[in-house]
Structure formats: structure tokens, C-alpha cells
Amino acid sequence: AQSVTQLGSHVSVSEGALVLLRCNYSSSVPPYLFWYVQYPNQGLQLLLKYTSAATLVKGINGFEAEFKKSETSFHLTKPSAHMSDAAEYFCAVSDLGGSARQLTFGSGTQLTVLP
Amino acid sequence: DAGVIQSPRHEVTEMGQEVTLRCKPISGHDYLFWYRQTMMRGLELLIYFNNNVPIDDSGMPEDRFSAKMPNASFSTLKIQPSEPRDSAVYFCASSLGAGFGQPQHFGDGTRLSIL
């Protein structure tokens, strides 16, 4: 069975500082991994996805994530936080061992950007 | 391009009433998903369809919940009778194709409050 753990339900950073949101997954087969962002009163938007090509994946809004098989991690980073990055971020996993097409979501990390 | 469209955006009703949530997926997408989001339980997959056929409804909480997809461009999620514990944000998402790496595209959700 696949699962996702997001360490830290709340993360605060100063504007201009590095953003690091942590995601660890559990999967018995090579996974597909996703990061989504949710702004207030909106649905989830895809930031980026890993599908077994390059291990460093670049997404929208300056975000990127690195797949590390040895650490079973897929942490999300952005070099310089902007006020508009304040939102909730979800990591999700899908794999061939799970029920077809299902995504398993982490519990989310609320990012606050301080001026 | 039009995204996933959900209606209504907000619904407030009294306990015992029937509630119908509606979703129009992205044109051409062949998978449709219904999720529920609450503070306590996070994002939960309720049911998903492939080519209008329900594939997995194991996440539907009770017989009070039912979902239909009469055609490729419309789906409903119905709760009858509704209860206060059904209060949540309900999301519809759609995706295209057979690959496990295909992302899901979310609507803006329906915020449901049962009094």
C-alpha cells in the first residue's frame, strides 16, 4: 500500500527566504509523485510531478522537487519565498500497486510567508 | 481552456434535506473523481469513474451518499438525508488517459454546511 507523510503541518518563512516542504512516501513499486497547491477557497492546482524521468523536477511559480529513492523523499523547494506563495501544499503518490488512478494525499503543509 | 466546473460553490441546508452537488469535467477527460475535504480527515477519495462507469466507491461513507455520471460531461454527488457531519468541502477532479502519471485537475469545490 502506498502512503505519504508530510512533516510539519505548518511552516513559516520570511519573504525572500528558502522554502522547504518535506514529503516522504512509502511505496512497494516505483511511484509517481505530485505536489499540489491549494489557495484559500480554491481547488488543488498541480505544481509539479515526477514520473520516473529526471529526478529533479521543475514546476510552476519557481518551485522544484527532487526525487531521492534512497531516502524515499520528494521534498519541495523554492529559493526565495514570495508573499503569494502562502497556501496549503499537498504531496501525493500514485503507483502501480495501488488502486488504479488513485492518488494518496498527504495531510498537507500550511505555508505562511512573513513580511 | 475551461477547467473542472462545480456547482453550487456554497450550499447551506438543514439536516434531513437532500443535497445534490454537480460537476462538469474537462472536455475529453475520461476519469472523474469525487473527494471530500475536512480539517479532521484531510482529503478523502469518495468514488471515481472511468468512461462514466463507477470503478471504486469504497470511499463512500454511507448509503446516504450516491454518485452518478450519466454522460461524459456531467456527474452528481447526492446526499440523502443530509447530516451535520456531512459538512465539508467537496471536490470534483478529472484526468485524461491511461497513464498512472496523469495529474488530476480539480474544481474549486462546493462548501457544504448542514445545519
Image: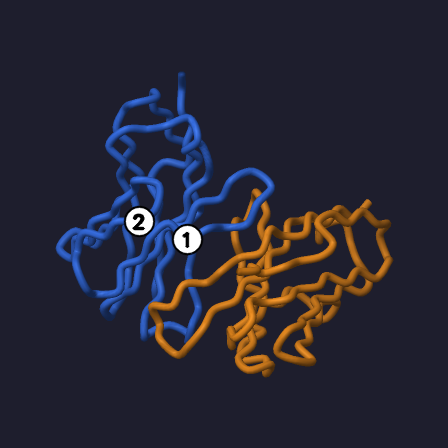
Chain colours: A blue, B orange
The reply, left or right, for residue B33 in relation to residue A21 is right
Subunit of mark 2? A
Q: Which residue is the site of mark 2? A: A59
What residue appears at the point 26 percent right and 39 percent down from the top-left corner? A77
Taking the spot 44% from the left edge, 45% from the top edge, the residue there is A37
- Quadrant placement of the C terminus of chain B: top right
Image side of residue B87 versus residue A48, left or right: right
Mark 1 and 2 residues: CB-CB less than 8 Å, in contact?
A: yes
- Against B104, residue A12 (above or below) is above
Few, some or many residues within 10 Å of mark 1 (<14, 14–19, 20+)? some
Q: What residue type is labelled 1?
A: Leu
Depth order, front residue of A97/B19: B19
**Depth check: A27 or A77 in front?**
A77
Kindly indicate the quadrant of the structure image that contains residue A12: top left
Q: What residue type is labelled 2?
A: Gly
> Which residue corresponds to mark 1?
A46
The chain holding disc 1 is A
Q: Residue furthest top?
A: A115
The picture quadrant where one finds residue A13 is top left
Residue B26 x, y percent position in the rendering: 55, 67
CA distance for labels 1 and 2: 9 Å
Find residue B64 and report its horizontal and vertical position in percent.
75, 67
Asked which secondary structure carries label 2, the reply is loop
Taking the image as shown, residue A80 lies to the left or right of residue B69, namely left
